[in-house]
Image: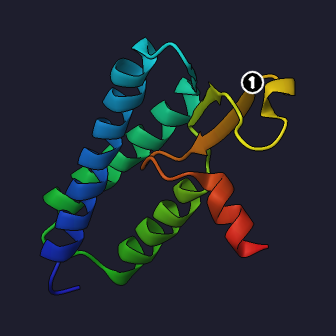
Amino acid sequence: MKNGKVLKIVWLISFIISIVVFVMTSIVLSDTYEIYNKTYYLPLLIIEIINIIFGVLFFIKNKITKSYVIIYLIFILITFFIPIYHNGNTYAPTGPNSHLMGLAFNERYLNIYGINIIKIINILK
């Protein structure tokens, strides 16, 4: 491809977003009493290593071929559906006879970019 700048910018944005989401879920949300946090570190590490390899290839090579672009887009698509963070919070339900119910639990499976995969799967159904 002649114009690899767009691809480099997309890679840089995806890399920064993944780091920001990791900091948000690991540090900011971990101190919240109502939140259940679990991070799957092995898939996160593998995805980030592959992402760094792509970044090194994009910034070292002067000419980026279409095959690199297609493989990177497939990689982004695959990582979009891999749950990395499992978050949940408890809350008191509202509505009629809510005083008879216990606490409710809202579960979220987030991908590396912080997008809730459960909502995506429900949309695709």
User: Taking 20 as reference, is 76 above or below it?
Assistant: below
Q: In which quarter of the image is the C terminus?
A: bottom right
Q: How is the image coloured?
A: rainbow
- At x 31%, y 55%, the residue is 14
User: Taking 2 as reference, is 28 above or below it?
Assistant: above
**Relative to the observer, which residue lies in front, 55 or 113?**
113
Residue 98 picture quarter = top right
| Residue density around tag 1, few if under 14, some if 14–19, many if 20 or more, within 10 Å | few
Q: On the rendered structure, is 99 left or right of 25?
A: right
Q: Which residue lies furthest to the bottom in this view?
A: 2
Q: How many labels does the image show?
A: 1
Across and down, in percent, residue 73 comes to 44, 71
Secondary structure of the residue carrying numbered label 1: loop
**Relative to the observer, which residue lies in front, 32 or 25?**
32
- At x 33%, y 55%, the residue is 54
Q: Residue furthest front?
A: 96
- At x 53%, y 25%, the residue is 41
Across and down, in percent, residue 1 comes to 23, 85
User: Taking 36 as reference, is 6 above or below it?
Assistant: below
**Relative to the observer, which residue lies in front, 37 or 74?**
37
Query: Callout 1, which amino acid?
Result: Leu
**Relative to the observer, which residue lies in front, 12 or 120?**
120
Across and down, in percent, residue 77 comes to 53, 66
Across and down, in percent, residue 109 comes to 62, 42
Q: Which residue corresponds to mark 1?
A: 103
Q: On the rendered structure, is 57 left or right of 76?
A: left
Q: On the rendered structure, is 76 left or right of 17?
A: right
Residue 67 picture quarter = bottom left
- At x 41%, y 22%, the residue is 26
